[in-house]
Image (spheres, helix red, strand yellow):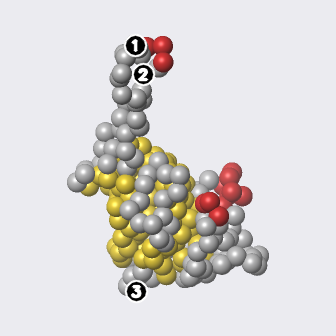
């Protein structure tokens, strides 16, 4: 099992987290920052396809089929669970490819592409973006677990232009936010752990 723990707070780019206590007209307002945000990285799933050869190296073959890009990895599940006194949000991705990910605290929910969604419940919000991935749903999905201490809900949006966004609504400002990668049968998991340390 491959496990890589990514923890840190990038103070130099803290302004990008868009967190603060000011009032907003958006669906939800963040009342502060989350320790350990923003974060970003790449989740390598399966065996990514090799890039196509350059035009100069490709011989001309009459009636040869045109090159088509390999299918993108698929976000197959978003699961919530309590673990060790913290809340875990697990994003399971299957297939082959490299999936970019980023997390940051936001002051309001602004979906990619200008979609309109219902307000995300909570006093503060963490936005999770996955790129280079598809998803099975065509409508926003709400994920809740009453056993969680910090997380009120997670709203997962449908894939658009190979980007899947999720918004984590929190009862208060999050404690330390940590990100782990876990290998699973047929794919990888991005595990976001939220809670006080």
User: As rendered, which of 59 and 140 lies closer to the eye?
Assistant: 59
Residue 120, relative to residue 136: is it above or below? Answer: below
Question: Farthest front residue?
Answer: 63
Cα gap from disc 3 to disc 2, whole angstroms: 51 Å
Q: Is residue 37 visible?
A: no
Q: Is residue 18 visible?
A: yes
Cα gap from disc 3 to disc 1, whole angstroms: 60 Å
Q: Residue at x 42, y 76 (%)?
A: 143
Which secondary structure lies at badge 2? loop
**Residue carrying label 1:** 59
Nearer to us: label 3 or label 1: 1
Q: Is residue 39 left or right of residue 181?
A: right
User: As rendered, which of 196 and 156 lies closer to the eye?
Assistant: 156
Question: Farthest bottom residue?
Answer: 146
Q: Is residue 147 left or right of residue 169?
A: left
Nearer to us: label 1 or label 2: 1
Cα gap from disc 1 to disc 2, whole angstroms: 10 Å
Q: Residue at x 49, y 51 (%)?
A: 162
Mark 3: give few (<14), some (14-19) or many (20+) Cα within 10 Å. few
């Amino acid at each position: 099992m491959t496990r890589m723990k990514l923890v840190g707070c990038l103070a130099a780019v803290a302004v990008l987290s868009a967190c603060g206590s000011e009032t907003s007209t958006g669906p939800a307002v963040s009342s502060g920052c989350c320790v350990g945000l923003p974060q970003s990285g790449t989740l390598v799933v399966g065996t990514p396809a090799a890039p196509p050869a350059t035009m100069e190296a490709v011989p001309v073959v009459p009636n040869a089929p045109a090159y088509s890009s390999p299918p993108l990895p698929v976000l197959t599940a978003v699961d919530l669970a309590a673990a060790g006194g913290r809340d875990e949000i697990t994003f399971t991705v299957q297939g082959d490819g490299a999936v970019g990910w980023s997390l940051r605290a936001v002051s309001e929910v602004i979906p990619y592409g200008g979609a309109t969604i219902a307000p995300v419940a909570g006093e503060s919000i963490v936005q999770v973006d996955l790129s280079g991935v598809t998803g099975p749903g065509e409508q926003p999905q709400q994920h809740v677990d009453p056993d969680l201490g910090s997380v009120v809900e997670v709203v997962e949006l449908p894939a658009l232009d190979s980007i899947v966004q999720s918004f984590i609504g929190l009862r208060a400002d999050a404690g330390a936010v940590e990100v782990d990668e876990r290998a699973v049968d047929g794919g990888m998991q991005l595990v976001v752990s939220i809670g006080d340390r």
